[in-house]
Image (tube, rainbow, N blue to C red):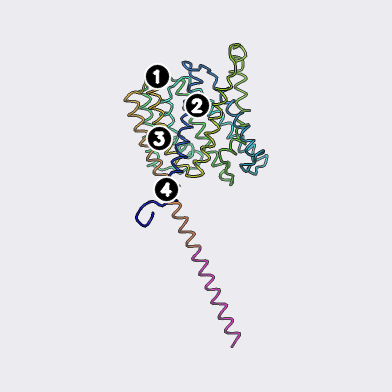
Amino acid sequence: MGKDGSVSDGVLKKIILSYTYVSIWIFLSFTVIVYNKYILDKKMYNWSFPISLTMIHMSFCASLAFLLVRVFRLVEPVSMSRELYLSSVVPIGALYALSLWLSNSAYIYLSVSFIQMLKALMPVAVYSIGVMLKKENYKNDTMFNMLSISLGVAVAAYGEARFDTWGVILQLGAVAFEATRLVLIQILLTSKGISLNPITSLYYVAPCCFVFLSVPWLIVEYPVLKESSSFHFDFAIFGTNSLCAFALNLAVFLLVGKTSALTMNVAGVVKDWLLIAFSWSVIKDTVTPINLFGYGLAFLGVAYYNHAKLQAMKAKEAQKKIAQSDEESGRLLEEREGDGTGKRIELQNKD
């Protein structure tokens, strides 16, 4: 703040940049979701091959990540042994492949708005799996919050006009696999001091995803594509779609790097409401009052969850500062005592 109470140029610049990063991430995330829906929906582009679409994304992203890391050297690779890659990255890649496959498949059966409502269960899944794998401590108030989010999503599902059981199973499966992946990243990588940003994640994980997805693709989609003589690969559609998916990962890199993961969570809530509004007004999906009421309950639960995380982060940061301050004070005291002892010895020698 300036002397007259106004915001300084440096602070104002940081605020503007933060909002810019948030806006770019929301726009790209919004675009990828709507674009995937357009390609996969039977009433739109009508290319109902979610595994193929995910494999196109993975091959494109892996290629660009390789160029950024190995050719142009704009991003530093992570030092990783073969054993660590096989024991940590490969399981994470398998879970990521399953999550993307199922979430893209859900677009064939469910509306964009309802999918966003179901995604509100992500904190519930992450916390529950974290407790089961002993990465999170069980707390009654947190579990009550998780139950309130679940109740909100259940109410939204009850009010869904185009409810499809198979689509819901696919999306819930995607949430479960993604939540497990996030917890395993903490257990298998973060605990070992390895930190992957979105670009290095793609560099290491995308090839794994491609290999894992090729197995169900050969069984499920390849025979159908082989028989379909009318299909011609549209480079404009799939190229721009893959570019948007890669740009989204870059936006995550910028957003988390320049702000925080919590900022992305809050921005995600804004994006979900925008997608629901877009789905209702442009795609003409039916959004009922019960839908909105249920998602409103879930939204409040997610907002409280983010608030609790923020408070916990602040408390942890405060404790760290106190510990650092105590350590610094102890070191200075030791130095002073050392100086005093040295001076006494010096005086004794003079005598």
Q: Is residue 27 above or below residue 50?
A: below
Q: Amino acid at mark 3?
A: Val
Label 3 environment density (alpha carbons within 10 Å; few <14, some 14–19, many ≥20): few
The label shown at residue 288 is: none
Q: What amino acid type should be assigned to the residue bearing mark 1? A: Arg
- Give me the C-alpha separation between circle 2 and circle 1: 17 Å
The residue segment tinted magenta is: 328-351
The reply to whether dot 4 and dot 3 touch (C-beta < 8 Å) is no
Tag 3 residue:
270
Secondary structure found at label 1: loop
Separation of marks 4 and 1 at Cα, in angstroms:
45 Å
Give the distance between the C-alpha atoms of the residues marked 4 and 3, in whole angstroms.
Answer: 22 Å
Give coordinates of residue 175: x percent, y percent.
Answer: 48, 30
Q: Is residue 181 magenta?
A: no
Q: Quadrant of the N terminus?
A: bottom left
Foreground: disc 4 or disc 2: 4
Which is nearer the N-term, disc 4 or disc 2? 4
Name which of mark 4 and mark 1 comes first in the sequence. 4
Which one is closest to the eye, mark 4 or mark 3? 4
What secondary structure is found at the residue carrying circle 4? Answer: helix
Q: Which residue is mark 2?
A: 103
Q: Nearer the viewer, residue 248 or 227?
A: 248
Pointer 1 or 3: first along the chain: 1
Q: Quadrant of residue 81?
A: top right
Q: Which residue is mark 4?
A: 12
Residue identifier under label 1:
162
